[in-house]
Amino acid sequence: MNILEIIEKKITKKSLTESEIQYFINEYCINKTIPDYQASALLMAININGMDDDETYWLTKSMLNSGQIINFNLKNVIDKHSTGGVGDKITPILSPLCAAKGINVAKMSGKGLGHTGGTIDKLNSIGVKTDLSIDQCNKIIKKNHVFVSSQTNKIAPADKILYDLRNATSTVNSLPLIASSIMSKKLSIDSKYIFIDVKIGDGGFCENLPKAEQLSKILIKLGKKFNRKVIVHITNMTQPLGKAVGNAIEMNEVISFLNNQFDSKELKDLIYEFVADIFVTLKVSKTKKDAYKEIDNLIKSKKTLNCFYQWIVSQGAIKSNVINKKYWNPKYKVEIKAKKSGYIKYISAKEVGLVSFELGAGRVNKNDPVDYQAGIWLNKTYNDKLNINDTIATLYSSKKINKEIIKKFEDNILISNKKFSPQKVIVKVMK
């Protein structure tokens, strides 16, 4: 085959065949015979002209088959994926909740980039080791019903190669390329059910509902092609999720939640709705009403908290250090005070994430170090009532917090005399 002819076909809006797509993945990602500049040209043509359902399926299949497929030989195996957001701490709460009900959660996660946090960083901040071998993952899930691991080079290696090139060529926003990237990794694990959280709003992955719906439809179709059930929750990221934004500080909120202390109604609503859908889908609860009661019981009885501790200890964390919060010791903090009374909202969730990033909680490149102590506690969140001199938020860091960061946070606060319109946490569920 000729890569120039393949590029020309896509430039002229013609569909590629399965063999042409397989050839591209093999020769660029594995055999290295196609140079970056030709691969970039093809990605740009795809970005502009799109791919049909068959092309997207063949691309996903080729990327999936570039690596290892893992089978744990267990029933009720699920995977959960989030497209990323500000304060997104769903995985370390959802996973032990499911494990407490005997549902197996097999999860490979990533590090945070830019304004969005990563589950791996959050777990690493409390001493959880996430650089696991496949054999370790197998042993941990069979003992504790859950593991969360960094992605290995053996899982869909073509995806990492393509993603790095997409990142360098401004072709990240192509929906077929996004869907194939997500699903090639998710399909590498033998999870029958894949639950995906697509976040919309300026702090999320999709800026609006139509784009989120379009991506969700592609993901669901791909799931059917591979005989997997994909359920997509489209969730609101116009405001940060919960009270904490960062790494160790988010784990504080996670542990409080599992201790039956709900600092954020929005976080509780999202967790209960998401987990209830999982319980009903897997038929461990008959109805969502039953599932809500079961979630309450699992948390109040401390069964979920015990599952959490067993899981993180199996991945190298020291339980006493976590219980006593020895992982949390920020050197600097600044309290942001209200200069007038009213009701609050953050103009941009993304800006909150960027402040956390500038405090040290984020990174530009995947191998950059992060400050686990850096982050933000949102003392007041959407539609909370403020009085003058109330603490709106507390900024934390291991380095001195400069005035520019403080001003950036203050400029993102909007205070109104009237309450803002109520917002749904879960915008839509698609199956």
Image (tube, rainbow, N blue to C red):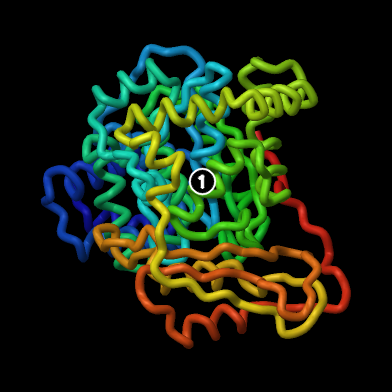
Residue 190 position, x and y percent, is 40, 22
Residue beneath the point at 58% across and 43% down: 256
Q: Foreground: 379 or 431?
A: 379
Residue 246 left/right relative to 59: right
For the C terminus, give its image quadrant: top right
Q: Please tell me in which quadrant of the rendered image residue 300 appears.
A: top right
Residue beneath the point at 64% across and 47% down: 234
Task: Tell me the element at label 1.
Answer: strand
Give the residue type that dot 1 points to: Ser
Q: Could you tell me if residue 383 is visible in this image?
A: yes
- In the picture shown, does residue 128 fall above or below 404? above
Residue beneath the point at 44% across and 47% down: 325
Residue 57 position, x and y percent, is 43, 37
Residue 386 position, x and y percent, is 78, 72
Q: Foreground: 319 or 231?
A: 319
Residue 267 position, x and y percent, is 66, 47
Residue beneath the point at 20% across and 47% down: 29
Q: Residue furthest right?
A: 418
Residue 153 left/right relative to 31: right
- The crowd level at tag 1 (other Cα within 10 Å; few <14, some 14-19, many 20+) is many
- In the picture shown, does residue 191 fall above or below 397? above
Residue beneath label 1, please?
Answer: 82
Q: Foreground: 233 or 413?
A: 413
- In the picture shown, does residue 404 fall above or below 120? below
Residue 60 left/right relative to 296: left
Q: Could you tell me if residue 227 is visible in this image?
A: no
Total marks drawn?
1
